[in-house]
Amino acid sequence: MAKHLITGGAGFIGSHLAEHLLQQGEHVSVIDNLSTGQFSNIAHLEKDGRFRCFIDDVHNDKLTEELIREADFIYHLAATVGVRMIIERPTETIINNIMGTEIVLRNACRYRKPLVITSTSEVYGKSQQPTFREDDDRIMGPTSKSRWGYAESKAIDEFLALAYFSEKHLPVTIVRLFNTVGPRQTGRYGMVVPTFVRQALLNEPISVFGDGTQSRCFGHVLDVVPNFVKLVRLPEAYGSVFNVGSQEEITMKSLAERIVKMTGSKSTIRLIPYAQAYPPGFEDMERRMPDLTNLRTVTGYTPKYSLEQILNDVIGDIRKQLESKDPFVLSNS
């Protein structure tokens, strides 16, 4: 039984990763400052003697070093996330993402611990490629648009991780996530699927930003997290970048329409110009589809969950939250 450390382990993805590892009989420690994660995501794991939780920050260098020294494998998920956070708190976004990653990389290198760094499809920027490959050129917007600060902070994380691999031989792998969704994801920070579902279940107008023609591919969190565990153990994956997600594409307007139909909602769909939805500094990408060839070659990855199944799971989860009438749950949805 190996020991695993998850930074940002009380977040949506981190909590599912912790659950997955415990189901495999492993030991799991998580560290999370609860800035965007929620203790309720991991509270049910506390009864398991193989699980430990530290409510703290990876910027606590001493504690982070100790937890890394004790671990066999590390997954770095701690980061500022969500479009709204990126636009409204750009300083925190950039500093948290870069400095936190440097602390984790430095200590992982000290103890030679295999490590997965989570990155994002945002690093592809404004590229118009039909599908994004890991070695594609990136096209960024101007520094005056704060949206790109997040993308560049994650790109710096990647550069730093790959520098540790090439110069210091750290066994590190990078995963670029494409719109991971599923139960426990909150819409507080601009995540589109839980936001649409919540609005539909409350029969509120569904707010589609822009003209609704922009498209995305959504991957189920239960499809995504097993890849972390496979990649962290594969020496042939070290020093490489892997797209992780789905190739089932849908426009935002079609997504809203499908959610209305699946929930039996009376919601209307309201198109809101970006200028009304966000402060100055926001730009969006028309489409974002991953090329999954690298991941498929190394891990044999094939998504098990269709978009229909993903939406059913999210609808069921948010419906349960609304029916619970728990003020804490409702205020954090």
Image (cartoon, rainbow, N blue to C red):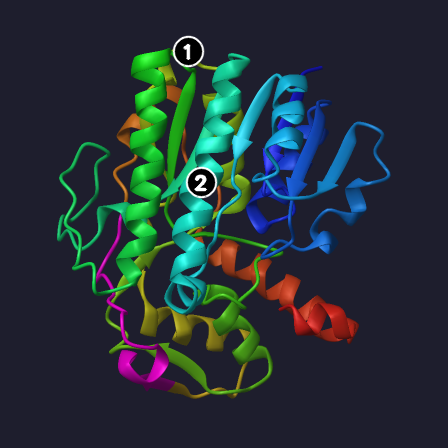
Q: Residue 81 carries which label?
A: none
Residue at 36% in and 27% down: 161
Please report the bounds of the magenta region as a residue range. 270-289
**Residue 223 covered by magenta stretch:** no
* Residue at image point 38% right, 61% down: 90
Reading the image, the residue beneath label 1 is 235
Q: In this view, does 145 lie to the left or right of 296?
A: left
Residue 324: x percent and y percent? 78, 71
Identify the amino acid type marked 2. Answer: Met
Q: Which amino acid does label 1 sit on?
A: Pro
Q: Disc 2 designates what residue?
A: 99
Callout 2: few (<14), some (14-19), or many (20+) C-alpha neighbours within 10 Å?
A: some
Secondary structure type for disc 1: helix
Q: For marks 1 and 2, give the CA distance.
A: 26 Å
Residue at image point 56% right, 86% down: 203
Q: Is residue 31 above or below residue 151?
A: above
Q: Is mark 2 on a helix, strand or loop?
A: helix
Image-based side of 229 in relation to 85, left or right:
right
Badge 1 crowding class, 10 Å Cα cut-off, few under 14, some 14 to 19, many 20 or more, is few
Q: Does the magenta stretch include residue 281?
A: yes
Q: Position of residue 147 (x, y in %)?
A: 30, 61
Camera sees residue 249: no
Q: Which residue is drawn at 28% across and 62% down?
A: 215
The percent position of residue 12, horizontal first and vertical second, equals 58, 50
Q: Name the front one of labels 1 and 2.
A: 2
Res 313 quadrant in image: bottom right
